[in-house]
Image (tube, rainbow, N blue to C red):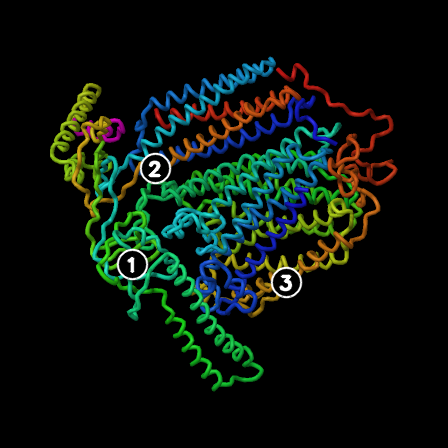
Amino acid sequence: MIGYQYGVTSLAFLMFGFILMMYMRWSIAYPDRELTGIARWIINHLGGGGAQKWLSEGRINGDLYNMFGAMHGTIMVFLGIVPVAFGAFGNFVTPLQIGAPDMAFPRLNMASYWLYLIGGIMMFCSFFLPTGAAMAGWTNYSPLATTIHFDGAEIFWTGQTQWLVSMVLIISSSLLGAVNFITTIFNLRARGMTWMRMSFFVWAMLVTGFLLLLAFPPLEVAALMQLSDRLFQSSFFLPSGLVVSNQLMDVAGGGSPLLYQHLFWFLAHPEVYVLILPAIAIVAEIIPNNTRKPLWGHHTMIYAVLVLGFLAFIVWAHHMYMTGMGSVVSTFFQTTTVLISVPSVVLVTCLLISLWGGSIRFNVPMLFASAFLPMFGIGGLTGLPLAFNLIDLHLHDTYYVIAHFHYIVAPGTIFAVFAGIYYWFPKATGRMMSTWLGHLHFWPSLLFMNVVFAPMFIQGLHGFHRRWYNGGIAYEQIAKVKLPDWLPFCEGHDYLWLNEVITWGAYGLALAQIPFIWNFFSSIFIGRKVTSDNPWDATTLEWSTPTPPPHGNFASEPVVYRGPYEYSVPGGARDFTPQWQPDPGQPEPVLEPVSEGHAH
Amino acid sequence: MEIPYTVTARPDTGLWNAKIGIWLFLASEVMLFGGLFSSYIFLRVGADYPWPFHELHVWPGLTNTFVLIASSVTVLMALDSLKLRKYGAYKMYMVLTILCALIFMGLKSFEYYGKFTHWGVKLKDNSFVDGHEPHDHVAFGKVATVTLNLEHAEAEWLKEVKGAAPKFKDASGKSVELTAGLVDDLRSQWHKDWQTAEGAVLEVNDKIRDIKDSAEQHGIDESALKALEAKLADAKKARDAVTSSVKLTVDGAPILVEATRGHLRHWTKKELVYRDGTKLDGELENDHLDFHAVTGWDVRAVKGLDENINAADNALIWKYLGEDKRQAFLKQKKEAIDAWVSKYSSKHKNVPNVEEVAIAAALKDPDFLREGFRQREDDHSTAHFVTPVANEDIKFYSNYTPRMNPYYAIYFMMTGLHGLHVIGGASVLAYFLCFGRKMYEKDPEHLCNRVEVGGLFWHFVDLVWIFLFPVFYLL
């Protein structure tokens, strides 16, 4: 139930974040064009008096762009992707796959959802405050984030302060969730579900849980400190002699802006893996099911994800090469960053090899899962240059970076999320989603994702800065530069023209989601009913439960006899052997008590 | 199926659910306080001001350390009694534990109170004086006009007007009774007017855009375009005429406000601007800061101290503290230097101009600076009244709250969060004490488990204090 709630709420937030992005794209592509119709009507209803604050003569102004930019990032990361990938799929699939009747702490689970929802609603409502929502980037760097609207009469009711309060709630929600997941996986596994019989999905959730558990508290510290800086005028992140709007700030100073960045990225880098591990996990379930082959390197992938989880904690400062923290520190983080690409490549390679020689069923989940591989590959490989601090000097804060991480999160994680929705939908609702609409969703999405993000690499390498809302003078200079001839479709066009291409790509992408939204809601009521509890002929435990799973999940206690990916076992009666099916004469597994020797 | 292992342990892990849960939660708590301790180090190492170490009284902290250790023992005894099924003893030990928590929080409040009522002023040359009960109002009189900025206007400033409620006249001479409600109305009316005027501008703009967009097919209708452009200019003029500033003249005797410094954006001799943009024209009467009792001074950070040990001799604070205090400082400084030089020269026999080298070395020693350049008069009987500190000499002032400097900020952040943990832990234990009977009668082992989980958390809270105490009170 909590899984469904997480799913629907986070999909709504994803859509909301997408709308913010469409405004931004308009401003970038057509900085001299007024908003009209409903787009203008919406802006008129924002806080602070609508148009007079957020539009200049009907056009999107810098403040609005910054606000939408900051909130797009925040909403997509903290209210969209993490809840949908970890909250929704984790909650629904994990207990089923390990044979547990529920999460270990159901009430904690509910508290976690409600904290998330309240935090999300507060975030949303901050758009209607007189100051508008937060506008200092999703990273919320001090001193900028501390000093925005610092002078107002009611500093508590500013978007910037509300962002911090909401984040404290969202972080607390994640912490409770992480405790619940790890405990469930440790203690509620079915009989016979030994560690190495757990699917890769469950392992990835376990590692994700640990990442959230250990990385989020330092961000909570940072949020509380920034809150104190705003509400109690302390100087955790404010240096001495800080001048804002030509006035010396009336604060003590002596604090450190760099400290904020360390605390933030100590969370936010592991957070990147929180965004991507559930995606890889979903794909790792769908690929063996549709190639009808075991997952290649199941154990290798488990060790890789553990190494990745550990390394994720010691790479954070590669986001901070430009802060002047020193070349020794940069070199250390550059080294660890290059190291972490090894387990990442192991994971993708295993998935790729899993395709080899399979008789692949290209159903809709598999289409999304197989598109995930090259898309995530592009995102991952373009990250390598960014790891080197020398190259980062040139690429830092350009569209190259935007393209890099969006390739990972948008056609990467979101495609995996779609794959997961199409795959587990019949288990959750008892009905299939339409295949035809699925194709109508998939192909345009794949096309437009690339139309949106591929040109950003070109622009970024040329120096397009990620925070230009209308470019100003820099635009005019770039407008004189023609694109190289060897680029397809680009003959005779300049770099600015790509802005329009991207923007229309984004609107196309929005249209491509309509079949999905229709498919999702209509299939709940009119989708084709499934005829078996295991419509995909899968091997893992969630397919042994009644459909949809009742309270307590299983009709009788599940018992596990084998590994999770036994497809096409030679000599088998069918091309899949489920985990709950014993070999002839195989005894029922028992839970061995901890021996005395172990206890000491 | 029911959720298993809520009370009994799972055989192969040897643990029940809540025990795993609490250890995981404690792991995240370790990261929370780990982040805070790291921040403490980061702030201390990077401090560009004398780090205020050894400033807290040790005895409340030390007492609290023993109180918490005692409570860790009693909570363990409570669990032990429960395991032996002695419910009476369990209750007694729980009461003792909660009592310890109350003592801890009581001492903590006492410490906090002392800081909140203690103020410090940093003067322009970074010399520093502390004391009690400053009077920090800015008196601004002969106010003849008030200008509201309708973008953000609030009515808070009206509360700071002395005497009877003032009367105003607007530009047309109509009398206005200014209330909070009226300010809100004016503000929203202005927002509405502006929206309407802007709407007219955009409407014309849209028409012009249409003509230009369809130019390729139909050609441009120059005369229509010209007419529209003229219309646009008018609309823009009308919009710009919707002014956000409303000027009110005081009707009757000029008014006097006593404004709290924190509410002001800035002020000069002739005007006073509140944080909501409300501007008052009048005359500044008094913006001195009156300190009632001085309890200490500090000249360590006086500019140039690193290069010139004598810079503090003429620090700004002596202007306010008087010649006696200055002489006392000079004497204290000389003693500190002499002690250092004699100690230094006994160790380094063959250094030429030993005094110079010794002083240079001394300046790097925080303890030397504390002894020679700083004075705390904890005995309030010696405190005396001072002349008001002139506003132009003040760089910064605050009570000892997080605002004072990052040291106090992190002190309050860490001890505050720890205090919240104490309150949280004690509340959970109190819940087990008051409402545990029913569960005990149903399944005593279930209550044991719960108390064990609560006790583990309580030990963690104790452990955090064991680190906090030396970090803030001793190091």
Q: Position of residue B335 (x, y in %)?
A: 16, 25
Compare residues A515 and A465 and report the one nearer the observer: A515
Q: Position of residue A392 (x, y in %)?
A: 48, 49
Q: Residue at x 40, y 22 (%)?
A: B64
Confirm whether residue B119 shows in the render: yes
Mark 2 or 3: in front is 2
Question: Do the CB atoms of the residues marked 2 and 3 lie less than 8 Å apart?
Answer: no
Left-right relation of B320 to A333: left
Q: Amino acid at mark 3?
A: Gly
Give the amino acid type for the residue marked by disc 1 in the picture. Lys
Q: Which residue is mark 2?
A: B401
- What is the magenta range? B355-370
Image quarter (top left, top right, bottom left or bottom right) of the N terminus of chain B: top right
Quadrant of res B51: top left
Tell me, yes or no, whether dots 1 and 2 are on the same chain: yes
Residue B467 position, x and y percent, is 42, 25
Labelled pair 1, 3 in contact (Cβ < 8 Å): no
N-term mark: 1 or 2: 1
Alpha carbon of mark 2 to alpha carbon of mark 3: how far?
Answer: 54 Å
Regarding mark 2 in the picture, which secondary structure is present there? loop
Whether residue A133 sits left or right of residue A440 in the image: it is left
Chain letter of disc 1 in the image: B
Which of the 4 image quarters holds residue B254? bottom left
Residue at 73% across, 35% down: A552
The residue under label 3 is A508
